Image (tube, rainbow, N blue to C red):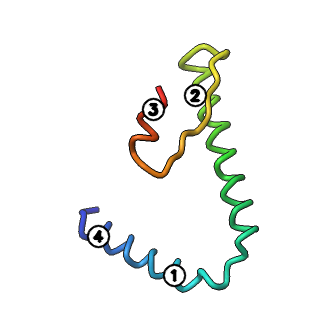
Amino acid sequence: MNKEQVDQILKYTKNQIIQLEDNIDKVLLKNTLENLRSGLEYIAKDVSDIVNSPEKKVFFPYGQRLNHFKTFN
């Protein structure tokens, strides 16, 4: 898939989100996203247990800017 196709998909998806925004239950959406993040944290922990020492505290990083991700080493 080339950049133009990816850009088209992102544009289409952005328009879909705008159309759906008024119909989405914000509390349900927040809960769903938190549950998805929990799943990612479980996966990150499992991978860490295999690759690193199990005692290390691991969580799925998130942030609003790229430099937030770079602080997680």
Q: Secondary structure at mark 4?
A: helix
Q: Nearer the viewer, mark 1 or mark 4?
A: 1
Percent position of residue 43, x then y = 62, 36
Which corner quadrant of the image does residue 55 belong to? top right
- The residues tagged by marks 1 and 4 sit, at their Cα atoms, a distance apart of 20 Å
Q: Identify residue for label 4.
A: 5
Which corner quadrant of the image does residue 67 belong to? top left
Q: Identify residue for label 2.
A: 47
Q: Nearer the viewer, mark 2 or mark 1?
A: 1
- Is the residue under label 3 in contact with that under label 1 (CB below 8 Å)? no
Q: Secondary structure at mark 3?
A: loop
Q: Identify residue for label 3.
A: 71
Q: Nearer the viewer, mark 1 or mark 3?
A: 3
**Nearest to N terminus: mark 3 or mark 2:** 2
The residue type indicated by label 4 comes to Gln
**Nearest to N terminus: mark 2 or mark 1:** 1
Q: Secondary structure at mark 2?
A: helix
- The residues tagged by marks 2 and 4 sit, at their Cα atoms, a distance apart of 32 Å
Percent position of residue 44, x then y = 59, 34
Q: Which mark is residue 18?
A: 1
- The residues tagged by marks 3 and 2 sit, at their Cα atoms, a distance apart of 19 Å
- Is the residue under label 4 in contact with that under label 2 (CB below 8 Å)? no
The residue type indicated by label 1 comes to Ile
The residue type indicated by label 3 comes to Thr
Q: Determine whether 9 is above or below 35 in the image.
A: below
